[in-house]
Image (cartoon, rainbow, N blue to C red):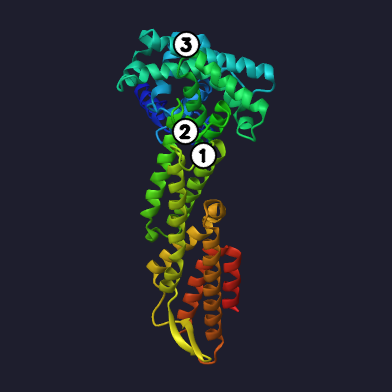
Amino acid sequence: MSNLSTNQASILRSIFSAAPDSAVVNLEQALAHEVTRGGPMAEVHSLVAQEASNRRARSLAFMPLLPLCRPAAIGPYPKFPFETLALLWTACKEKEPNAARAVEALGPIRDEDERAYAHSACDAVCRIAAEGLRGGLAEFAGVRTLLDKVPGRAELFIKLLDLAPLARAALMRLPDWMGRLNEERAVAIRIAYNDGVDLSDDGGPRLLDILCAHMPEPWKVLHLISAVMDRPTDRFAASSEIARFGEFYMDDIDRRLGEGRNFDPNGGRAAGVAAAESVHVIALEIAEFETSLDISRDGVWGARIAKQKLALAQLAETRLAQIDKALDQALPLTQVKFGKGVRGFPKLNEDPSPPQLNKAQSYLAFFEQCRASANQAGYGSTRAKAGERMDARLTQYVEDLLELLRGEEVQNPERIRRYLEAAADLVAVAKGEQAAAIIRRRAAA
């Protein structure tokens, strides 16, 4: 079997260089068995393995700036084109191949000495990159052209490269810093921030940009700001150099509230889960403001946050209030005499409506998923009452259907079973699969 031509190999390198990291890793693993077989596929694996190794080294060298170059990144920090780091790594390899090889040769870190050496090797590449861009060296012309498409972006990227060694050290301590603040941790955060300021006037906030980009919950950058400024008032924070962080997350709260008001229950269970997760994030963001800053209700940010907190509770309560109507449409009732009064009884004139069941699942998914933030966000009592009504409604409905199945003259038992299955599906969303399994077993018996 013939080997790959030079042109074919070049095309494959281009394709692999543009693929996402996950695709490269998966392809390398999928083709691993081809190594011993030889031929074109073994060469393809070799090309993929080279790309994967190249990316690992690049990611190590520029680790502090990685999240700033992700296409989907959302945060108060600056964003750069996805191709930036790939072009920069190529330029560094051309300018200082020995420095790049030192990073490529790094293996698993087993002790602090090896960690210090690895950080030193990676920091050296960042310095080469910063000097190459700042000096307009020929090897870095492609990177500079890409960054210069937006005025000032190249200069900002150079500043962040200058901060990379400081950020790399700070990121090692970030998990501890995000825990409960004590004096030792607060002092360490302030020292790192001031070291950034020593590099440039805006070095402290830019260091926070990098750290924020690495956080799974990036609004917790307010936690670091609290340490740097010793829990400032919202008035002071709003007039400081870190004001843009607070403004961004208050804007994010407003954006999520707007999405919540436009909630479409036709999206089914997934839509309900997504809406509840957004509500949960809003609650976390508001809580972070209240924990990290000394908030005054009539302060610059305090008044806005108070309105957002009220809007969040009203939004959640509106969604929870729609559960009753959704259940009535998905599991319709007819009024029948019961003792001296009347009560609802399953209405079985037609089969269950999939669109109505879909809507009901959406609202019940919201009910279940918003559990974590209900008390914190001020609608815990409303949710508890909605849960009691829902539970009573579903329980009685299931019991009535089962009683119909036990009758001696059962009309349309298959339709009854379809409604039982529909009720079980709704119970699974609201109370879990175990509760739904009990209904299904009782129906089968």
Residue 87 in the image: above or below residue 68 = above
Residue 251: image tag = none
Q: Residue at x 44, y 13 (%)?
A: 130
**Type of residue at label 2?**
Arg
Q: Which residue is label 1 attached to?
A: 295
Give whichever of 219, 428 is nearer the camera: 219
Using the rendered image of the protein, determine whether residue 39 is visible from the camera's viewpoint: no
Local SS, label 2: helix
Specify which label sits upstream in the sequence, 2 or 3: 3
Local SS, label 1: loop
Left or right of 255, for residue 21: right
Residue 128: image tag = 3
How far across and how far down the image is residue 27, in percent?
48, 35
Q: Residue at x 47, y 62 (%)?
A: 320
Q: Quadrant of the N terminus?
A: top left
Q: Residue at x 45, y 13 (%)?
A: 129
Q: Which residue is label 2 attached to?
A: 235
